[in-house]
Amino acid sequence: MLPALCSARLLPLLPLLLSALLPAGCAGPAARPADPASAQVRRAVAAWSAAPPASLAGIPLEDWSYEVASVRRDGVRAFARAELRYRLAGYDAAPAGSAREVELAAEPGGHWRVTADRPAPGALPQLWDQGPVTVRRGAHALVLGGAGQGPETLDEVAAEADRAVPAASAAWPGRWAGRVVVLVPGSLERMAQLLGRPAREYQGLGAVTVGRVGAAPAAADRVVVNPEGYGQLTAEGRRIVLTHETTHVATRAATTATTPLWLSEGFADWAAYRDGAADPERAAPALGRAVRAGEVPGALPADAAFAFGGDPDALARAYEGAWLACRLIAERWGDAALVALYGRAGREPQESALREVLGTDGAALTRAWQEYLSRELGRRALR
């Protein structure tokens, strides 16, 4: 009878019919029983991770949890892949995440003991993976210093970050949390480890901001200081760098993949320079040299021009040109128009945003910017 059951019309019923016709004990392969050790490992990780470790007591952590995704046994050892979730109380509106590998050792009675916790293979480390963390709190800033950072540096960074937050709020009237988290690792190499990039890409930079483009305000954004580059800056340079990076945090929710980098980077510099009497010849030296040599850029800086690790002089010209483009817009159309352009450029193409907000197009703005560069940076050549 069985061959007759395999018609196309009855084929979907075959598994049910077979289970009814086969004798007991011949119903196919039995499901593999669950490994009891896996459940024990999961329980051990849950108990161990019920609260942050005592070594992190100074960091304002909340919603701390490890969610185990998989367990692998190797004799008397076990390795649990887990996702660490946590928030910095008072600073993060959304949790930060970190892929972890938890190592456990078997103990008598079927128990397991956690012996190590480290970044999962290929995952980025947390600051505390590099050693003890020192905490400094300001009125608007939380500064976490990595192993090897001195208290004087952290106090100075906290004070500067406290000044940067009101400056960013003055430039960006949009809704944001009005506070910032700053990480100060112990060295350039350790900074690069946190960011997962070669150290050479950050040489000469004072700080960078990491976060999710288009994320909710006060999501897990972090300003990460390059202690070597930051330490070489003047007091004014440190102020400009931290205000620039804090402005990126403030504008995070309005920034999307649509936002051109000349606008996002130029706006951050505009926010950093707007309260001072920034002389373009002094603040844009690389671009000034090019303009005075007759090399006025043919277009606003492309996104690729802001990539780290390339020609530092070309990178400087891109940032300086972006700043002067935003400075031009604020001078000609007003601060409010620059802010409105930023918000609209995150929701629609650049050309549409320029027409709606400024009543112009990319070609006309580029010509105005080229004339502005020649006027502001070419003065020395005209003397």
Image (cartoon, helix red, strand yellow):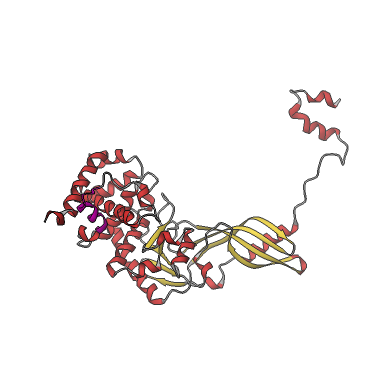
Residue at x 76%, y 29% (from the top left corner):
13
Residue placed most toward the observer, 45 or 207: 207
- Where residue 49 sits, quadrant-wise, is bottom right
Quarter containing the C terminus: bottom left
Q: Nearer the viewer, residue 137 or 244?
A: 244
Residue extending farthest to the front is 293
Q: Is residue 289 magenta?
A: yes
Q: Name the side, left or right, on which 47 lies relative to 154.
A: right
- The N terminus: image quadrant: top right
In the displayed structure, 108 sits above or below 37; it is below
Over which residues does the magenta segment extend? 284-296
Image spot of residue 41 (x, y percent): 69, 61
Residue 56: give x, y in percent of width and height: 52, 71
Q: Is residue 114 left or right of residue 291?
A: right
Total marks placed: 0
Residue 355 in percent (x, y) is at 26, 38
Q: Visible in this render: residue 53?
A: yes
User: Can residue 173 be seen in the rendering of this structure?
Assistant: no
- Residue 57 lies, with reference to residue 311, above or below; the image says below
Residue depicted at 52% across the width and 71% down the height: 131
Kindly indicate the quadrant of the structure image that contains residue 180: bottom left
In magenta stretch: residue 31: no
Residue 341 relative to residue 198: left or right: left
| Res. 53 image quadrant | bottom right
Q: Nearer the viewer, residue 196 or 167?
A: 196
What is the magenta segment's predominant secondary structure? helix
Residue 127: percent from left, percent from top:
49, 66
At x 30%, y 58%, the residue is: 169
